[in-house]
Amino acid sequence: MRNPSNKLIEDIIKEKSHKDDKLVDIIMETLSLGKEAAYRRLRGEVPYTLDDILIIAAKFNISLDAIIGRKQHGAVLINADIIDIDDPVYSYNKYLLSQTAIFKEVTRRENGKAFMAFNLIPYVLYSNYQTLHKFRLYRWIHQMNASGNQLSFKDTHLLDEVWATNQTALKEFSRIQHVDFIFDKELFLNQVKEILLFVQLNLIDKETLAQLKNELLQLLEDIEEMSYTSAQKEVTRSIFIANVSFESCYLFFEADDYCMSGLRTLGISVITSQDAWLCQQQRRWIESLKRYSTLISVSGEINRLAFINKQKEYIKMLDI
């Protein structure tokens, strides 16, 4: 008789995997087993060990309660993609790889969608620009550095490997079929304030300030262009401007047999989860923000111009 616990584990794995993936291959790869050992588990002849279950839970972001069939309301397994201050550039590269993996999961399945609410300029937009991208990491390193040593912006460097990983991540994100962006009305203001702080600390020189201002203006043009053309491409990008404030950045990805929720934390990192209950709550929250927002894509020209002009005013604050 087949072990019912094995079937429960395998059913959960199927839910988290692509429909074309073979279960035996998944078990072999995940648990580093030979084909016969994997088949013995699939036939129920050998139960999954506690070590097996822990590996499966970590691999697929599955709650242990869900695996043993006693899911507690609100108890979920999360993955913390936290950047390590002791080796920030290396761990940042690992973080980008984890984001790339999420984008790939969405794009390799049917009906891929992303719903994202930002009170700061989103990574998937600013990281196309090297100086802005470098500034976000620099700002985080400076704040987390407890030694008090003030490294200047020009003395901070991004490895070529990091930039290459970043470009791969952006390419995968660009393939997601449908994305809804919800932006705070003051999207650019916080970025401008942070730049001005480092100018006042004499850690950013005039040349770098000019580069940052120029890239912010180019980025704003990208957003405006996206709002005009979002319905004219194979992939759609809808932009909403929130009429309410929200305290963090919220992410939700879905495709056939897949979901992922994300929440920005510690300035630059993200905590994610594939827990179905948490994904549902995250989507409901983002949809609620959308209801209190104004669509500026394609239509809504007056609101679009008002938003763009306001962001330009914020950027002009860098004229010092």
Image (cartoon, rainbow, N blue to C red):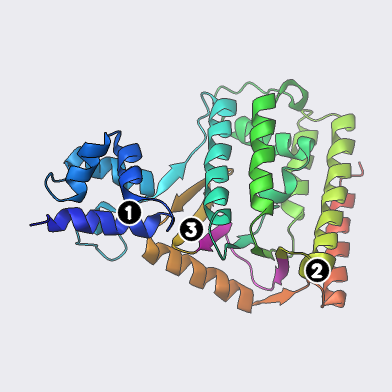
Left or right position of 167 against 215: left
User: Where does the C terminus fall, quadrant-wise?
Assistant: top right
Most foreground residue, 166 or 168 = 168
Q: Which residue is mark 2?
A: 232
Q: Which segment did they paint magenta?
A: 237-255
Tell me if mark 3 has few (under 14), some (14-19) or many (20+) residues whose alpha carbon lies within 10 angstroms of its own. Answer: many
Of the image marks 3 and 1, the number of the one nearer the N terminus: 1
Label 1's element?
helix
Label 2's element?
helix
Q: Quadrant of residue 52?
A: top left
Residue 122 seen in this snapshot: no
Residue 32 image offset from top left, x and y in percent: 30, 33
Q: Which residue is mark 1?
A: 13
Tell me if mark 1 has few (under 14), some (14-19) or many (20+) residues whose alpha carbon lies within 10 angstroms of its own. Answer: many
| Residue in view at x 58 percent, y 39 percent | 96
| Residue in view at x 72 percent, y 34 percent | 134
Of the image marks 1 and 2, the number of the one nearer the N terminus: 1
Mark 1 residue type: Ile
Residue 38 seen in this snapshot: yes
Left or right position of 162 against 61: right
Q: Quadrant of residue 168?
A: top right
Q: What number is the disc on residue 261?
A: 3
Mark 2 residue type: Gln
Image depth: mark 2 or mark 3 in front: 2
Q: Is residue 304 above or below residue 314?
A: below
Q: Is 238 one of the magenta-colored residues?
A: yes
User: Gap between marks 2 and 3, in whole Å?
Assistant: 28 Å
